[in-house]
Image (tube, coloured by chain):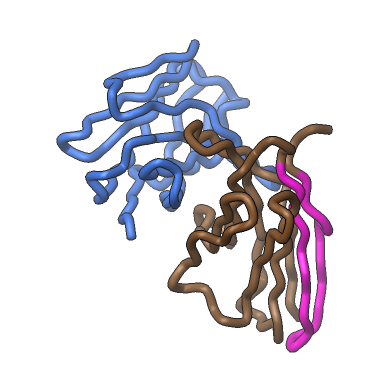
Chain colours: A brown, B blue
Amino acid sequence: DTGVSQDPRHKITKRGQNVTFRCDPISEHNRLYWYRQTLGQGPEFLTYFQNEAQLEKSRLLSDRFSAERPKGSFSTLEIQRTEQGDSAMYLCASMVVGQETQYFGPGTRLLVL
Amino acid sequence: GENVEQHPSTLSVQEGDSAVIKCTYSDSASNYFPWYKQELGKRPQLIIDIRSNVGEKKDQRIAVTLNKTAKHFSLHITETQPEDSAVYFCAPTNTGNQFYFGTGTSLTVIP
């Protein structure tokens, strides 16, 4: 499968715990995006990378959230001290700069109890 | 940031009829205008897109029209089929720096 992959697909955690999600983009894609989607809403932009550089973060993104893309390939999104309001689908997407066509991964569904 | 609105939020049509969804945006620098389809429990998938130097683009039963002056673009689906039932999102962007998704339109095609 040469598409965008995400791991895990589902995560249940208790409030206050830390969680980390992984995204593997399509191999030649130099941009990688993270989104959060709650029921009935469109994907909400969180942050994006061009190669290993994090170029932008949403102003709405809490400092409990951090993302990395250390070698310009896969990326991780960590949420520290999770809250029930963090329950959502976390989507990753990748694309080639200049082409603007994003390809989404299947998402990681997070439930915080 | 960009303000993106979609209308209507829900749409029901009879199979075979046409459906039109409108997306309005605020950032005049937006130059790429995609539409995504998301079926229940699935990832968003690009179905059609248009760039700012083009007014209309068609792909079989799906078309997108753009009015840059008025800052809106629309998705047109003709001869609707039950498998067109899904949530549709617009996501205008300025060179892919950020994609601002609309709140979605839930389309139901009644057989």
Expressed as whole percent of the image width and height from the top left, the position of residue B54 reads 30, 21
Expressed as whole percent of the image width and height from the top left, the position of residue B14 reads 47, 24
- What is the magenta segment's predominant secondary structure? strand
Query: Count the marks: how many?
Result: 0
Expressed as whole percent of the image width and height from the top left, the position of residue B100 reads 42, 51
Give B91 or A99, whichever is nearer the viewer.
Answer: A99
Which residue is at a point 52% across and 38% down the rendered structure image? Answer: A97
Quadrant into which the N terminus of chain A falls:
top right
A53 relative to B42, above or below? below
A105 relative to A86, above or below? above
For residue B11, say whether it is visible: yes
Which residue is at a point 60% across and 35% down the rendered structure image? Answer: B45
Expressed as whole percent of the image width and height from the top left, the position of residue B106 reads 49, 43
Q: Is residue A93 magenta?
A: no
Drawn side of residue B17 relative to residue A2, left or right: left
Give A83 or A68, whichever is nearer the viewer.
Answer: A68
Give A10 or A20, whichever is nearer the viewer.
Answer: A20
Give B86 or A64, whichever is nearer the viewer.
Answer: A64
Q: Which residue lies most toward the left here? A: B69
Quadrant into which the C terminus of chain A falls:
bottom right
Splitting the image into 4 quarters, where does residue A47 fall? bottom right
Drawn side of residue A98 relative to residue B8, left or right: right
Splitting the image into 4 quarters, where does residue A69 fall? bottom right
Q: Is residue A12 magenta?
A: yes
Which residue is at a point 26% across and 49% down the rendered structure image? Answer: B27
Q: Which residues are magenta?
A: A5-25
For residue A37, say whether it is visible: no
Drawn side of residue A12 relative to residue A97, left or right: right
A68 relative to B104, above or below? below
Which residue is at a point 62% across and 75% down the rendered structure image? Answer: A65
